[in-house]
Image (spheres, rainbow, N blue to C red):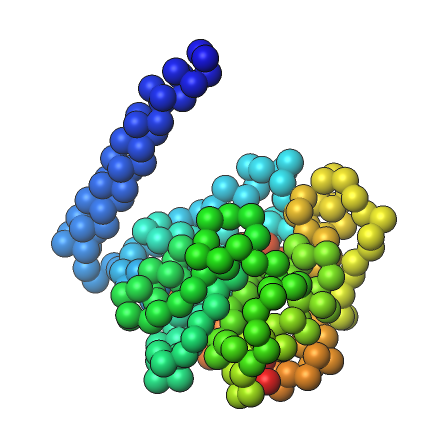
Amino acid sequence: MLKKQIKYVLKPMLKSARRIRSEVKGIRYTLDMLLFPEQNNLFCPCCKKKFRAFAEGEYINIPDKVDVKRYINVRQDLVCPFCGSIPRHRILASWFEENKTMIKPSNILYFAPEKSMLLWMDRNKIEYTTADLYESADLKLDLQDTKLPDNSIDLVICNHVLEHVDDFRKAIREVHRILRSGGSFICSFPMDPQVELVDEDVTVQTNEERIERFGQFDHKRVFGMQADELLKEAGFKVEKISGEFYPDEILPVVGPANYDMNILFRCVK
């Protein structure tokens, strides 16, 4: 009973604190734009705002969740202070900007949707359906077995999910099954420069073992630099969406970890 009472009291206080932080963030952004417009040389295409600097993440402060060694000697000031985007989100939003006519009429299914990308899609009036097995979403779906009809989706978006599922090959085949002919699967995942295709081991079970081997407590594998071959095995034609082709103002670089490559894949059925 006491726990419920405490929760009842704290819940509105936490909401109020989040609202105040959001308002302060908005005020700081407005002041920066008014007082130092010439210094706002960084741009986030997700929230469409300019900044003097991006923020640093908190990754090196959570050694119980990630391998902090992967964040050392990698640039950390990569996080949009307004919407929380990191390089892969800004690269994808920039690619979407170039391909609006392709995605606007699409039936889009977005697995494990990211706040910064939903912000871009909502602002551009892109309709989508979200999906997740554990978090709140429009549909509760298992990427490995969606139970959706064959050839029913135009575009599936799935960033940094394949390293979490039990059987990533089954998940990729399932996406291929539900996509219409000519449909696209846009995905990204951690890519270790020291790995060729994929490093996985079902005997690695504990959080500590997974952090050491795969970089994060809930990762079941880490992919390699030739992982696009695994996508081709499922029948996809694969093209890279690479940060090297986008302007420096969005900071399209590797990071915040050394396996967070500035590359996404567009896989066409």
Position of residue 262 measured from the top left corner of the image (x, y, whole percent): 54, 68
Q: Quadrant of the C terminus?
A: bottom right
Q: Nearest the camera: 119 or 85?
A: 119
1 shown above or below 208: above
Q: Residue at x 30, y 27 (%)?
A: 12
Residue 95 quadrant: bottom left
Q: Is residue 223 left or right of residue 61?
A: right
Q: Residue 139, can we see it? A: yes
Q: Residue at x 38, y 61 (%)?
A: 118
Position of residue 189 measured from the top left corner of the image (x, y, whole percent): 61, 63
Q: Residue at x 48, y 65 (%)?
A: 110
Q: Nearest the camera: 229 or 252?
A: 229
- Which residue of the protein is positioned furthest toward the left in this rendering? 34
Position of residue 178 measured from the top left corner of the image (x, y, whole percent): 58, 75
Q: Residue at x 81, y 47 (%)?
A: 204
Q: Is residue 126 left or right of residue 88?
A: left
Q: Quadrant of the N terminus?
A: top left
204 shown above or below 200: above
Position of residue 16 measured from the top left corner of the image (x, y, whole percent): 27, 31
How many numbered markers are drawn?
0
Q: Is residue 220 left or right of residue 238?
A: right
Q: Nearest the camera: 186 or 252?
A: 186
160 shown above or below 68: below
Residue 85 quadrant: bottom left
Q: Nearest the camera: 31 or 268?
A: 268
- Which residue of the protein is positioned furthest toward the top in this rendering? 2
Q: Is residue 246 left or right of residue 179?
A: left
Q: Residue 264, can we see it? A: no
